[in-house]
Amino acid sequence: MILSTTPTLEGHRITRYHGIVTGEAILGANIFRDLFAQVRDIVGGRSGAYEVELARARKTALAELEEAARALGANAVVGIDLDYEVINNMLMVTASGTAVDIRAG
């Protein structure tokens, strides 16, 4: 499965559009309390623990997006957009894109 933020894939032709697919991951309020309790982890204005959790949430959202595309019979997702939102002390990562069939050539 090819995942791309671009609308087309160089060297490939889109042969079918399956529709929009999404994936979400939500980090609960406890993650903020736990991460801020580790203030000593912050070096140079960056928190390694927070970055690890963000990366994990992004990977989860992309994995759900890929699973949704696979369920539609697609072999690629193009035009992927990643959004990060804070809602009521929870961090939500959303990935959305268009599930497609591609063929080399």
Image: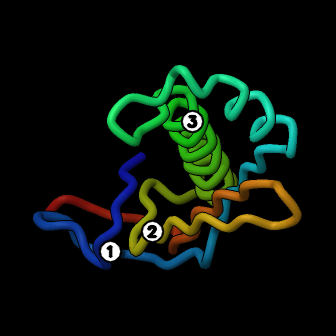
- Which sits earlier in the primary sequence, circle 2 or circle 1? 1
Q: Is residue 74 above or below residue 66?
A: below
Q: Residue at x 47, y 71 (%)?
A: 81
The three-letter code of the residue at mark 1 reads Ile
Mark 1–mark 3 Cα distance, whole angstroms, equals 37 Å
- Which sits earlier in the primary sequence, circle 1 or circle 3? 1
Locate residue 98 relative to residue 94 in the image: left or right: left
**Please, what secondary structure does the residue beneath circle 2 have?**
strand
The three-letter code of the residue at mark 3 reads Tyr
Mark 2–mark 1 Cα distance, whole angstroms, equals 15 Å
Q: Position of residue 48 (x, y in %)?
A: 46, 28
The image quadrant that residue 104 belongs to is bottom left
Q: Position of residue 47 (x, y in %)?
A: 48, 34
Q: Is residue 13 above or below residue 41?
A: below
Q: How is the image coloured?
A: rainbow
Mark 2–mark 3 Cα distance, whole angstroms, equals 23 Å
Q: Are marks 2 and 1 in contact (CB under 8 Å)?
A: no
Q: Are marks 2 and 3 in contact (CB under 8 Å)?
A: no
Q: Residue at x 66, y 65 (%)?
A: 22
Which quarter of the rendered picture does the C terminus lie within? bottom left
The image quadrant that residue 88 belongs to is bottom right
Q: Residue at x 42, y 58 (%)?
A: 76
Q: Position of residue 84 (x, y in %)?
A: 60, 64
Q: Position of residue 87 (x, y in %)?
A: 81, 67
Mark 3 nearby-residue class (10 Å; few <14, some 14–19, many ≥20): some
- Which sits earlier in the primary sequence, circle 2 or circle 3? 3
**Please, what secondary structure does the residue beneath circle 1 have?**
strand
Q: Is residue 78 above or below residue 72?
A: below
> Which residue does the numbered mark 2 point to in the structure image?
80
Mark 1 nearby-residue class (10 Å; few <14, some 14–19, many ≥20): some
> Which residue does the numbered mark 3 point to in the structure image?
50
On residue 14, the disc is 1
